[in-house]
Image: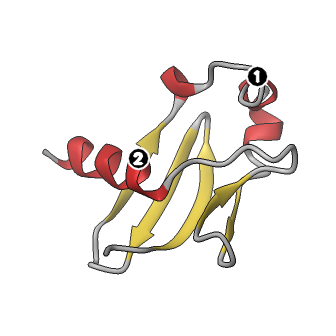
Amino acid sequence: MVKLLEARAVGGYQLWVRFSDGTEGTVDLADQLQGPVFEPLREESFFAAARFDPEVGTVVWPNGADLAPEFLYARVKAAAA
C-alpha cells in the first residue's frame, strides 16, 4: 500500500504531495471544496493551514477536514498522465 509521506499547501487551492513509491506532484483541489467541512477551506488563508499529520497519514486542516490519501494519489497520478 502506497503511503502519503509529505503534503503542503503551495498557493491557491493546491497541495504538493509525495508518496512512498516516489510519486509526487501538485494537486489542484479548487473543484473539491464542497460540503460543510470543506466550506472554510474556500478561504485561501485557511486552505494554506493544511499540514501533513503522520498519525493519520494524510493532510489535515484545523477544522478537522482531511482528505483520503488514496484520493490524493489518484489526483496526482491523473495530473501526471
Earlier-in-chain disc, 2 versus 1: 1
> Dot 2: what SS?
helix
The residue that appears at 76% across and 22% down in the rendered structure is: 39
- Against 21, residue 71 (above or below) is above
Residue 4: % across, % down: 47, 70
The residue that appears at 59% across and 35% down in the rendered structure is: 13
Q: Residue furthest left?
A: 81
The Cα–Cα distance between marks 2 and 1, rounded to whole angstroms, is 18 Å
Q: Are marks 2 and 1 in contact (CB under 8 Å)?
A: no
The residue under label 1 is: 39
The residue under label 2 is: 71
In terms of image quadrants, where is residue 37? top right
The answer to whether residue 26 is visible is no
The residue that appears at 63% across and 19% down in the rendered structure is: 34
Quadrant containing the N terminus is bottom left
Residue 56: % across, % down: 65, 69
Residue 62: % across, % down: 86, 50
- Against 48, residue 35 (above or below) is above
Q: Which mark is residue 11?
A: none
The answer to whether residue 56 is visible is yes
Quadrant containing the C terminus is top left
Residue 6: % across, % down: 54, 72
In terms of image quadrants, where is residue 2? bottom left
The residue that appears at 71% across and 29% down in the rendered structure is: 38
Q: Is residue 55 left or right of residue 10?
A: right
Label 1 environment density (alpha carbons within 10 Å; few <14, some 14–19, many ≥20): few
Q: Which is more toward the observer, 54 or 13?
A: 54
> Dot 1: what SS?
helix
